Image: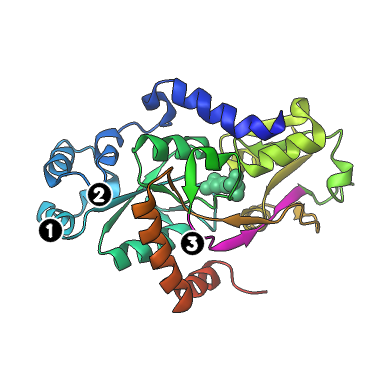
Amino acid sequence: MKKNVFAMAIAACMAASLAACGGAGTAETTGAQTTAAQTTAAQTTAAEAGETASAEETTPAETKAEAEAAGGVLVMATNAEFAPWEYYEGDKIVGIDPEIAQAIADKLGMTLEIEDMAFDSIIPAVTSGKADFGAAGMTVDEDRMVFVDFTDTYANASQVIIVKETSEIAGSADLSDKKIGVQLGTTGDLLATDLAGDDNVERYNKGFEAVQALLQDKIDAVVIDSAPANVFVEQSQGLKVCDEAMSQEEYAIAVAKGNTELLDKINGALKELKEDGTIDAIMNKYIPAE
Ligand code: ARG
């Protein structure tokens, strides 16, 4: 049962209208559907219609047209609610994934566009061609590989438990009868469901909302990736992260199944960026070593 949660969610999402899967922001549709391989004309139309992401609005049309003529546009789907991997600074999406993606786009001579959406809309966006790739602290997962191909991995992570400082919960062994908050469709969602059963899992669109629920005593714990957990605990009062690392996960970039051309290009760029120290430098900037 549990193994098929992603598959079921994605299948359901694909069966429904794709527009409905795009999350709240549907303004991106026209611009994002236009992939790098497609014509400049379509891009120009999208730009004229004002349907492109806000980041580009400041780019003069000529510069954008030139960039497209030179190398094309790469559209990245993400869920910018996941510091330090991706989050907003003002109205700009920043973090490890945007910086790695920018470095990849630079290597490929392409222009990066970032589309923010619900986490569980990222894979449907990639499979439908609304986005060229997904980068979102996304764990390589067998069930997801039915729908997308993953690049080489670029980071390690694990699921951890956030509780109130006063909580008696010390680890996963204490979670079986507790109310656990997670971000919908994540590996934390799967793990919590496994530990405490479907009825005990509260699914939120944002990790932040789960943390708010914990602060308000609506739930007993939050299960989420380690680096975001540390950020949430730093930003709020009275919370702690349990010591236990409950899983070993690896993050990679997702491209549409069978898009070996893009997969190979990204892997080539990633390899160079690992070798020349760029990936390490980006990581250290956002997650300074203790
Ligand atoms: N690593 C987890 C997963 O792949 C959580 C990722 C959540 N990412 C985000 N940008 N909200 O399921």
Image quarter hosting the N terminus:
top right
Say whether residue 167 is left or right of residue 77.
right
Looking at the rendering, the stretch of residues picked out in magenta corresponds to 151-162
Query: Where residue 36 sits: x, y (%)?
Result: 25, 49
| Amino acid at pointer 1 | Glu
Residue at coordinates 59% horizontally, 72% vertically from top-left? 288
* The quadrant where residue 202 appears: top right
Q: Tell me the element at label 3.
A: helix
Query: Where residue 261 sits: x, y (%)?
Result: 34, 53
Q: CA distance from mark 1 to mark 2?
A: 13 Å
- Is residue 208 visible in the rendered image? The answer is yes
- Is residue 216 visible in the rendered image? The answer is no
Q: Residues within 10 Å of mark 2 (few under 14, many from 20)?
A: some
Q: CA distance from mark 3 to mark 2?
A: 23 Å
**Nearest to the observer: residue 39 or residue 240:** 39
Residue bearing the label numbered 3: 96
Query: Where residue 29 sits: x, y (%)?
Result: 29, 34
* Ligand 1 within 8 Å of the CB at mark 2: no
* The quadrant where residue 125 appears: top left
- The reply to whether callout 3 and callout 2 are in contact (CB within 8 Å) is no
Residue bearing the label numbered 2: 36
Point out the tag, 3 or 2, that comes first from the N-terminus: 2
- The reply to whether callout 1 and callout 3 are in contact (CB within 8 Å) is no
- The reply to whether callout 1 and callout 2 are in contact (CB within 8 Å) is no
Residue bearing the label numbered 1: 66
Residue at coordinates 34% horizontally, 31% vertically from top-left? 26
| Amino acid at pointer 3 | Ile
* The quadrant where residue 131 appears: top left
